[in-house]
Amino acid sequence: MGKLTKDQAEVALKWFATMRSEPDIQKIQEWWYTELPKVKSHEEFNIRYPVGSTGWYYFQTMYRYSEIMGELVYQGLVPVEFVLDALGGVGFNDTVKMILEGRRKEGPYNALVAENWEWLYKQILKYRDEAIKQPRRYK
């Protein structure tokens, strides 16, 4: 990852501080890494975690932070490398992609769901693939 500018670092740290200030963030992250990967389809997600359920709230919380990060990267306020290197790509995986793609099909209101998330996910995969081909050398 290239050197962050002071402005980029401030934006990234504010985003991270906001996410970490979420009252249930530790429970949410634990659910995100242990329960969400068990979901095998959008339909299963809707059955297991209907609107208003704790799981639905957890998903919405993590997804929204990821969506905001997508906009920050798109606007050039945070580099994509930061999301993968510093945050481990938190919130960006194929299970989330599957659920969000299913949401888009639920009706016109959801047609634009996750535009920023999807764009950033593609950037993360591209960056990861390039990094695998040419690992960075630390000096």
Image (spheres, rainbow, N blue to C red):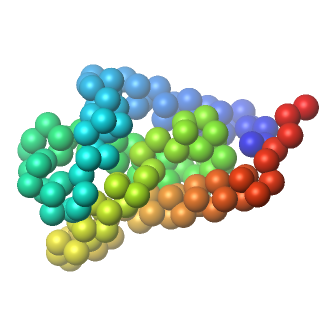
Residue 105 seen: yes
Position of residue 48 measured from the top left corner of the image (x, y, whole percent):
11, 49
- The residue closer to the viewer here, 56 or 64, is 56
45 with respect to 114 (left or right): left
Query: Residue at coordinates 72% horizontally, 33% vertically from top-left?
Result: 6
- The residue closer to the viewer here, 139 or 44, is 44
- The residue closer to the viewer here, 44 or 105, is 44
Query: Residue at coordinates 22% horizontally, 75% vertically from top-left?
Result: 105
Position of residue 81 measured from the top left corner of the image (x, y, whole percent):
66, 47
88 with respect to 5 (left or right): left
Residue 22 seen: no
Position of residue 75 measured from the top left corner of the image (x, y, whole percent):
59, 56
Query: Residue at coordinates 43% horizontally, 53% vertically from top-left?
Result: 93
7 with respect to 105 (left or right): right
Position of residue 78 measured from the top left corner of the image (x, y, whole percent):
62, 46
Query: Residue at coordinates 18% horizontally, 41% vertically from top-left?
Result: 55
Quadrant in the picture for residue 47: bottom left
